[in-house]
Amino acid sequence: MKTDLENKGLSASSFRFAIVASRWNSHITAKLLSGAKRALAEANAAAVDVFEVPGAFELPLAAQKAAQTKRYDAVIALGTVIRGETAHFDLVAENAARGISEAGLATGVPILFGVLAVENLEQANARSGDGDDNAGYMAAISAIEMAAVVSEIGSENTARGSSAK
């Protein structure tokens, strides 16, 4: 079976990536990080820098700061939020998602959402295994694709000089 990399012919050899990973639930997030690194290595990424933050709530700021440096073609945000007995889960998951989205839009640099928001440890383990369905691996594949798309859009001639209307 071909991976997404092979199916799309993706190469990251001309792209630099930052991975911002949460230490909270590190037994899961470490597997997401491993999956992301594997995808980037398979695609021959030019460079990969990893930054750690305390938890998923802190991901948006660190991802935005990495994107603002303009050293990276895409940023991958990885974390794990497991539902507990309080509303804390909802607050962290919702704000991580919104913050990561807003950071990408504000900087113009793709910031990929590789944050698991799951009901229990069983679901977290199912989404962080060794295969290509690892959420970190999938976020990295999307980062490669978005880096390529944004690069292609940025290298096009202006609308005045093209046939686009």
Image (tube, rainbow, N blue to C red):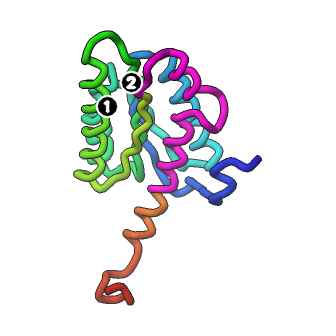
Q: Is the residue 149 above or below the residue 105 in the image?
A: below
x and y percent of residue 104 in the render? 30, 49
Principal secondary structure, stretch drawn in magenta = helix
Q: Which residues are magenta?
A: 117-146
Tag of residue 22:
2
Amino acid carrying mark 1 in the image: Leu
User: In the depicted view, which residue is nearer to us: 132 or 47?
Assistant: 132
User: In the depicted view, which residue is nearer to us: 19 or 165?
Assistant: 165
x and y percent of residue 77 in the render? 39, 36
Q: Which callout, 1 or 2, points at the residue further toward the start of the chain? A: 2
x and y percent of residue 27 in the render? 51, 15
Alpha carbon of mark 1 to alpha carbon of mark 2: how far?
A: 7 Å
Q: Are marks 1 and 2 in contact (CB under 8 Å)?
A: yes
Q: Quadrant of the C terminus?
A: bottom left
In the image, 57: left or right of 40? left
Judged from the image, the secondary structure of the residue bearing numbered disc 2 is strand
Q: Is the residue 105 above or below the residue 122 in the image?
A: below
For image coordinates 61% across by 49% down, the residue present is: 44
Which residue matches tag 1?
59
Residue 88 shows up from this direction: yes
x and y percent of residue 82 in the render? 40, 18
